[in-house]
């Protein structure tokens, strides 16, 4: 991985940490995402899933992705605010 990619990842992590500290909505989304992730991990650790569990797995994956998209959009807005303010 090149130096630029690493620095972008570091900045991304720093922005995420700042939002976790300063933005209640971002914290809520992150906590919800983590909750879905834990539920999904528990579910997929089973050897076999019945039809209802498979449906639940799909639902959890979609919800996690939706939250991730919302968090990413917030990160992008925050980044633009930071760049325009400097």
Image (cartoon, helix red, strand yellow):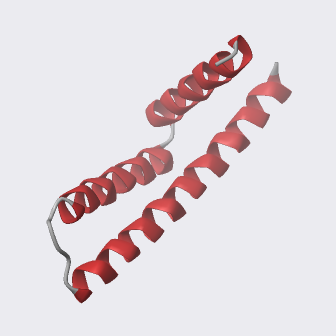
Q: Is residue 7 above or below residue 38?
A: above
Image quadrant assignment for residue 2: top right
Residue furthest out toward the left: 47
Tell whether 10 sits left or right of 77: left
Tell whether 83 sits left or right of 62: right
Q: Is residue 63 above or below residue 28?
A: below
Front-most of 31 and 43? 43
Tell whether 38 sits left or right of 47: right
Residue furthest out toward the bottom: 51
The N terminus lies in quadrant: top right
State how many labels appear.
Answer: 0
Residue furthest out toward the right: 84
Q: Is residue 27 above or below residue 8?
A: below
- Which residue sits at x=61%, y=47%? 72
Front-most of 35 and 23? 35
Q: Is residue 49 above or below residue 4?
A: below
Front-most of 33 and 28? 33
Image quadrant assignment for residue 61: bottom left
The image position of residue 75, as x and y in percent, is 64, 41
- Which residue sits at x=49%, y=46%? 26
- Which residue sits at x=82%, y=18%? 86
The image position of residue 51, as x and y in percent, is 25, 88
The image position of residue 13, as x and y in percent, is 54, 26
Tell whether 21 sits left or right of 14: left
Front-most of 57 and 23? 57
């Amino acid at each position: 991985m090149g130096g630029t990619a690493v620095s972008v990842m570091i900045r991304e992590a720093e922005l995420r940490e700042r939002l976790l500290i300063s933005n209640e909505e971002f914290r809520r989304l992150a906590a919800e995402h983590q909750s879905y992730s834990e539920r999904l991990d528990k579910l997929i650790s089973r050897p076999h899933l019945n039809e209802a569990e498979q449906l639940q797995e799909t639902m959890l994956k979609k919800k996690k992705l939706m939250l991730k998209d919302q968090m990413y959009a917030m990160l992008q807005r925050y980044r633009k605010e930071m760049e325009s303010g400097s």
